[in-house]
Image (spheres, rainbow, N blue to C red):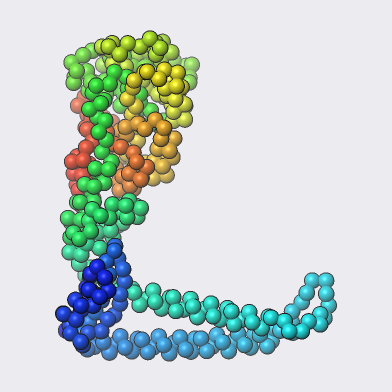
Amino acid sequence: MKTQTFKAKDVKSAINLVNSEFGDKAIILSTKKNNGFVEVEASDNDEIIIDHQKKIEERKNFSNVFLKELKTKSQNNTENNKNKVSYLNKENPNIKNNNFSEIPNEIFEKIKDDIASLRKEMNGMIVTDQSGISDELSYQTPMKLRQENFSPQIISKLNYSFLGKSLEDGRVSFFRELSRKLASNDFSRLLKSKNIFILGNSGSGKSTLAAKLASYLSDAKNTKKINFFEVSNSSTGHSDVLKSYSRVLGFSLNDYKSFDFKNYNRDDEWINIFDFSGEINFSVQKIKEIKNSFPSFDFCSILTVQSGSNSEMINGITKKVVEIRPMVAITKLDECWVGAEEFSSLALNNARIGMVTGTKVIIDSIIEANENSLTKYMKDNFENV
């Protein structure tokens, strides 16, 4: 004799499963819908059946007593208060056939409806401890993903990836589907681009990423023809960070005002990396000006997002750059890991991750972000949550 939860596509199929397992003796303890399936909890245990019936009677008795008490009190209050109504600027009003006595009855009916609704919700609940949760049931996957801090919105949006699968298979399938949604296909375009715009919030590692890309492209294309251009609204000269990288790598550092956007030759062998300093609003405005003034100028844009950013920050920055549609670079990965909250926010904002990188190393420190690498990262970092 035992208690068991049966899962099917509809109520009829679930009841048939109950009858096949327990026969006519079984009692239905609860029913509810979960992820498009009907779940029925049933039992053939004599003690559970008796206890369940007692609880039903107790709920009925409690409801009757409670409702009776409410009705008595409402009637008493009506009698006590119907002669105590005051009116603004009027004394001892002589008003007959008023409707104040009907108000408590309306409230009473509303309370009864609320109690009936609450009873229905309570009947559909199952209270259990951790030992009562089966890892083989796919409806546990969203619960685990919520515990790992993935947002309810992205779990609901990608629920097709884990339905009908065991917990672990469902989690991995969810990770892969999320990685597929997040992975950018623009990394190969980056290798072919002659002009690269790097923008992001202050302190997100823009200048460091510019240096890493210069080193990466220099090795990949076997060239030293790389220029740094600092795009700034400041007149104090170049930043010390980009200046030091320029000296170490041996690439020239220039002001973007000296760049001839109008007469730019696409066949030019030089690779130009533009570091947009300052706040993101300035960078977005400047890029829009370049696009509008020189529509034939081709460039690849990269948005730096520091690992450890919260969802609010990601929502804000992705909305500001929506017209530019840049490839995302996750930076400072050696200082802080990328959490489920960040992945969720990036996916919900349709952001695409093209690369990940740390801070401490310049050479060979850029990793292409694709479906496989992102899936592996999630498996490795969320498996013990």
Quadrant (top left, top right, bottom left, bottom right) of the N terminus: bottom left
Residue 45, visible in the rendered structure: no
Front in this rendered view, residue 176 or 102: 102
Among the 4 quarters of the image, the one containing residue 145: bottom left
Q: Residue at x 76, y 84 (%)?
A: 96
Q: Position of residue 287 (x, y in %)?
A: 42, 24
Q: Position of residue 165 (x, y in %)?
A: 18, 59
Q: Residue at x 18, y 15 (%)?
A: 222
Q: Residue at x 37, y 18 (%)?
A: 296
How many callouts does the rendering have?
0
Q: Position of residue 271 (x, y in %)?
A: 28, 16
Q: Position of residue 235 (x, y in %)?
A: 48, 16
Quadrant (top left, top right, bottom left, bottom right) of the C terminus: bottom left
Q: Is residue 20 above or below residue 50?
A: above
Front in this rendered view, residue 315 or 113: 113
Among the 4 quarters of the image, the one containing residue 338: top left
Q: Residue at x 35, y 86 (%)?
A: 55
Left or right of 374, for residue 277: right
Among the 4 quarters of the image, the one containing residue 119: bottom left
Residue 82, visible in the rendered structure: yes
Q: Is residue 14 above or below residue 156?
A: below
Left or right of 4, for residue 351: right
